[in-house]
Image (cartoon, rainbow, N blue to C red):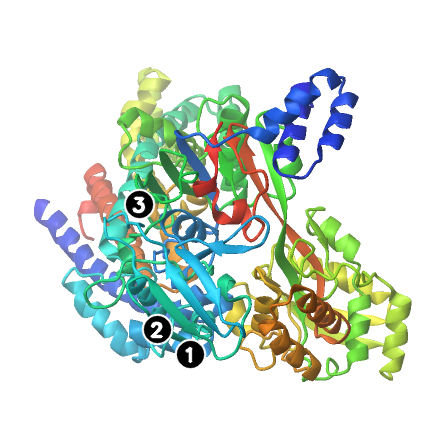
Amino acid sequence: MKNILIDIVLQRLVIGIFILFGVSILITLGVEALAGDVCSAILGQAAEPATVAACQAKLGLNDPMHVRYGNWLVNAIQGDFGTSLANNREVSEQIGKRLGNTLYLALTTAMFAVPIGILLGVIAALYRNSAIDHIISTTTLTTISSPEFFLAYILMAIFAVKLGWLPAISNVSPSMGFLERLQASALPVATLALITVAHMMRMTRASIVSLLASPYIEMAKLKGLTPGRIIIKHALPNAWSPIIQVVVLNLAYMVVGVVVIEVVFVYPGLGALIVDAVLNRDLPVIQATAMVFAAAYVLLFILADMLSMLANPRLRHRR
Amino acid sequence: MSLDKEIKKLQSQVSANQMSRRTFMTSAMALGVGALAPGLYSEAAKAAPKKGGLYRVGLPAANTGDNFDTGTNSDNFMITVAQGAVRNCITEVTADGQAIPELAESLEPSADAATWVVKVRQGVTFHSGKTLDADDVIASIEHHRGEATDSAAKSVAESMGKIKKDGKNSIIFELESGNADFPFLLSDYHITIGPVGSDGKIDWHAGDGTGPYSLKNFEPGVRADLVRHPSYFKPDEGNFDEVKAIAINDVAARMNAMTTGQVDAIARCDLKTAHLLDSKPGISVLQIAGTKHYTYPMDVRLAPFDNNDVRLALKLGIDRDAFVNAVLRGYGALGNDHPIGTSQNYHASDLPQRKYDPEKAKWHLKQAGLSSLDVEMSASDAAFDGAVDATQLYAEALKAANINLTVKRASADGYWSNTWMKVPWSASYWSGRPTADWMFTIGWAAGGNWTETFWDNARFEELLVAGRAELDEAKRGDIYREMQSICRDQGGSVIPCFVNNVDAASDKLGRPDKLAGNFEMDGCRSIARWWFI
């Protein structure tokens, strides 16, 4: 079994590398297709042909696309993501700080959202079709159906403006202490949690409920077990696979899908970075950020598959 | 609004020079505090700068690509941090719209205003400890000139002619022709002064400067932390111990940060909710008439815009009052189809204000031999906030004049490279320039890179050259009046409004009696000029 697992992980990693390669080509083509380049973007209304030309020459933008991509690829494989075209800073340095902030936000959110989501799902399944189930379902469906910036503003209006408990903007900095940082990022964490909890709760509930009609659960019932015990001991272990998948999907969302939340709360994360970089046509930064995002997806899904296999022995055997 | 708040409001208007003593007294009377009024008035009028404190300011228009090569700076965050705090220019624009020496000690013109001798201020040190001299100034200007420069200030810097060093602290500028406004060119926010290195160039990215604050920590697009430069040469500036400039690009987030007290001041308020912010205790919304104006430039080389009657019909077909009320929420002034604002020197206030007049517009159409007209305009919110809606409003107003305007929504991405000055008619804006000559030269002179209407008017060109070298104020006034009138009646641009700078500040902040209007937040210099009371 061990060998099969390792085989599968290795296989996925190789596929992952090809995916990253493909993503980098798509990004290059995409940025190339956008109107203008970094020079006209930075100079904006003030661009005149001579200064744009000088800027392009300085940044080496006159080389054909495949040459620039080739150079980038050779350097990137060696771990050198180059310097930003817009401000001449090391891309890795810029991304490093932002990645830390983004991961902090994702992990803090996951710490709250994953247990709460699964717990609510189990409770909703346990008391399905009761008042509790309806309350949980309605609330979570409401939060997931609201646009995230709307939720963000509601939370901000209540906790920052009316009550004054939490800051309206999350301008976290490396010098902040743990508690200070937690307080500063409380509102984005809460917003992100409200959105992701619903997914996980719905999936947990659905996968448990779908199992409850199976003969072995009926057997358990006939043995006289309590509903709680049936769900936790008998249904849940078999429901893990889909739950893990949806949890990981949400984790990925927490890393890559928080652009709007970062903007609303002025949180210095990767999402804000890639938006700025796209506006500036700053290809090295866009490439590197996209690589981080793509790698996060690839790794998280390998993790999801592994965990699913561990939780469900049937998946470990090739048919 | 509470009584306390009302009084604060009156006091802040006094401080901002928007209210006379008499009006203050009368208003105080009306509030029932007439007996206290004289004391309240002098309290507001006399506050002197005090040192100390941490100033947290929320600024818009930051980007991860921001850097201290000021040739690439273009918007509020970097103008504030680089030009307004970390560096200085050779001259600065005052609240009265004058250019006074900053890193210069004096600027002396020759009789024809074509040669200028600039004495560099002595005893000024960079944050790194280096002493400022003529080499720093020359290298800083040269950065914006020549073939290889990618500076947005290239045209300004190249208009400075031959630059010669004349001793350690003196520079001679030999312009191609006289320019009485030369000191203003040296105040351009792109042309900040950095320390020259051994290679004769300036290491812009290091962020060294002579300004009131040195850079402690800079995360592009996120924040800049600044500390006071202890040996700064202006004793009454650089009053805060420390400054945190926080990038808040989202306007709602900026308003929230101000509301909840996370920052002491913000630039560029949300016009829709500014009145709500103003009604909060302890916060004042500051409104200063500025030079920024929105324009609808037509390519006058192309039909139908090559016909001045058509242009006049389109100018008469815009409802300027509705525009200022709906698009600017009242935070602005009516435009008169020329680029010089009410707050500027040489504004021709005696030119009749053009009003919405569909009947007269129809008459002009008839003169052009048309009974109705179909035109298309490209607009995008990149041109200015709400440009697409504003243009729809314009289209509605034009219907009464038998003009059918189709509004084409252009992509905000790449608007300036692909739409503006590429299509026959588009929406645009100008942040304005501190002098009439500069504005006319950069935006209206024949053949200019940014002459957005491709206009070429012989009389205008003649006056432009004559006005530039004219050192006699009265004669210059006449010249600029005529030029504004030519723009208004023959130019290719519809200019419906001038935009006020609308910022907000905590009442704990002290401000100079009058704020500069050349940019938002006291000319983007609140960090240098303001203080805590």
Q: At x 77% / y 21%, what residue is drawn?
A: B29
Residue A50 image label: 1
Q: CA distance from mark 3 to mark 2?
A: 31 Å
Horizontal relation, residue B511 to residue B274: left or right: left
Q: Residues within 10 Å of mark 1 (few under 14, many from 20)?
A: some
- Asked if marks 3 and 1 touch (Cβ < 8 Å), the reply is no
CA separation in Å, label 2 and label 1: 25 Å
* Quadrant showing the N terminus of chain A: top left
* Figure quadrant of residue B24: top right
Which picture quadrant has residue A245? top left
Can you say whether B298 is above or below B132 in the image?
below
Residue B165 in the image: x percent, y percent?
A: 32, 70
Q: Is residue B388 left or right of residue A316?
A: right
Q: Which residue is mark 3?
A: B215
For the residue labelled by badge 2, is the local secondary structure a helix, a strand or a loop? strand
Identified by mark 3, the residue type is Leu
> Which amino acid type corresponds to the residue marked 2 in the rendered image?
Lys
Instruction: Give how far across and how far down residue B73 sits, in percent.
Output: 42, 59
Name the residue tied to disc 2.
B164
- In the rendered structure, find residue A269 and report the number of the disc placed on it: none
The chain carrying label 2 is B
Tell me if residue A298 can be seen.
no
Disc 3 and disc 1 on one polypeptide chain: no
Q: Is residue A95 left or right of residue A171?
A: left
Label 3 residue SS: strand
The reply to the same-chain question for discs 2 and 1 is no
User: Callout 1: residue from which chain?
Assistant: A
* Chain of the residue displaying label 3: B
